[in-house]
């Protein structure tokens, strides 16, 4: 009798424990991707002090306001014991001297650039992000419609362009794929039905394209800041009527000249976007940028 009662009590305790078992811990949220160029906030001196870096400022146009900020860290000089070397870790450039940073570069332990952010139109917002590997460009992202998201991504291998992906309608999915062989455009795939897959291809073989023409940005000028758009299908200009005893007025026509296809990346205007009137200047730094600015310096 006592044994039966003990077993019954044991079962009751187990049932209560199972019913009140705490739920499993929730899965940890996926960590956000680390930005290519980390932000340091507005106080450069405080950042340099916190990270143990040396901050150097340069006034290129001698107007009393710094235009270039460089952060260095000190390392031991392996060739001269007791001495220190300055290794560049970050540089910020105000290229047009308006008080806003237009170009930011970060460097690895070897002094080679690893990432870069650029404001192409000098509006204070980053439009281009470039990733480097072993000092050579590996990927470049461009925001052509200024919505904070990349519309064009270019991929490189050993510094040579191999692929370009376009999001022409701004839905976050690629709808045009360009593939390059030896740095030259070889084929273009286009998603015409919005399913995320290329269903129309144009290929270049022996100097001639094959396949029906598609409304892709492959037949556009080179500027990286422009946005892709369908190729023009306007008819050629109507030739004037031949001469006759009574001169006839030539037929009106609006000739349309189709731009030649580029070899790197197309860029006509997006059909659903309106570009600002101001053209984006090239993001190249001022001529005073040293060619080997990432190399260690003896201190």
Image: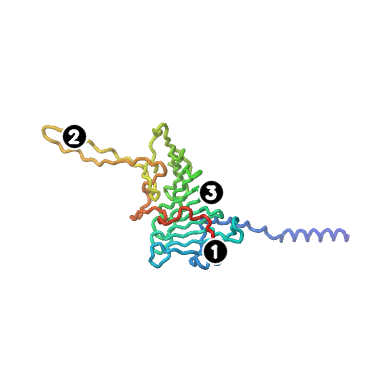
Q: Residues within 10 Å of mark 2 (few under 14, many from 20)?
A: few
Q: Nearer the viewer, mark 2 or mark 3?
A: 3
Q: Which quadrant holds the N terminus?
A: bottom right
Q: Quadrant of residue 15?
A: bottom right
Residue located at (34% from left, 55% from top): 278
The Cα atoms of the two marked residues, 2 and 1, are separated by 77 Å
Element at label 2: loop
Look at the numbered discs 2 and 1 and tell me whether their residues touch, using CB distance below 8 Å. Answer: no
Q: Along the line of sight, which residue is nearer the eye, 141 or 269?
A: 141
Circle 3 SS class: loop
**Residue 88, x across and y down, in percent:** 52, 58
Q: Earlier in the sequence, mark 2 or mark 1?
A: 1
Of the pair 50 and 221, the residue shown nearer to us: 50
At horizontal 67% and vertical 57% (from top left) the residue drawn is 24
The residue that disc 3 covers is 134
Which residue is disc 1 drawn over? 53
> Which residue is the site of mark 2?
241
Q: Helix or strand or loop: what does disc 1 sit on? A: loop
Q: Can you give x and y, in whole percent of width and height, for residue 96 in the image?
A: 38, 60
Which residue is drawn at the image coordinates 45% and 55% (left, top)? 290
Q: Do the residues bearing badges 2 and 3 touch, measured as CB atoms within 8 Å?
A: no
């Amino acid at each position: 009798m006592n044994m039966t009662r003990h077993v019954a009590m044991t079962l009751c305790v187990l049932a209560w424990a199972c019913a009140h078992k705490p739920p499993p811990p929730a899965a940890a949220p996926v960590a956000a991707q680390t930005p290519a160029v980390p932000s340091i906030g507005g106080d450069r001196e405080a950042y340099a002090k916190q990270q143990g870096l040396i901050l150097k400022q340069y006034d290129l146009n001698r107007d009393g306001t710094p235009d270039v900020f460089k952060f260095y860290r000190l390392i031991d000089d392996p060739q001269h014991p007791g001495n220190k070397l300055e290794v560049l870790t970050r540089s910020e450039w105000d290229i047009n001297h308006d008080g806003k940073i237009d170009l930011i570069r970060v460097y690895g332990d070897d002094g080679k650039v690893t990432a870069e952010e650029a404001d192409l139109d000098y509006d204070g917002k980053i439009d281009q992000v470039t990733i480097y590997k072993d000092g050579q460009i590996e990927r470049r992202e461009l925001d052509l419609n200024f919505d904070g998201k990349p519309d064009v991504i270019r991929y490189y291998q050993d510094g040579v362009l191999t692929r370009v992906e376009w999001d022409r309608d701004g839905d976050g999915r690629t709808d045009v794929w360009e593939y390059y062989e030896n740095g030259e455009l070889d084929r273009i795939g286009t998603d015409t039905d919005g399913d995320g897959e290329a269903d129309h291809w144009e290929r270049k073989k022996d100097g001639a394209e094959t396949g029906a023409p598609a409304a892709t940005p492959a037949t556009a000028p080179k500027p990286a800041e422009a946005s892709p758009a369908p190729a023009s299908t306007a008819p050629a200009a109507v030739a004037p009527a031949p001469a006759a005893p009574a001169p006839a007025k030539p037929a009106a026509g609006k000739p349309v000249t189709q731009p030649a296809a580029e070899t790197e990346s197309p860029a006509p205007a997006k059909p659903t976007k309106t570009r600002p009137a101001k053209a984006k200047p090239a993001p190249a730094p001022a001529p005073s940028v040293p060619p080997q600015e990432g190399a260690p310096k003896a201190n």
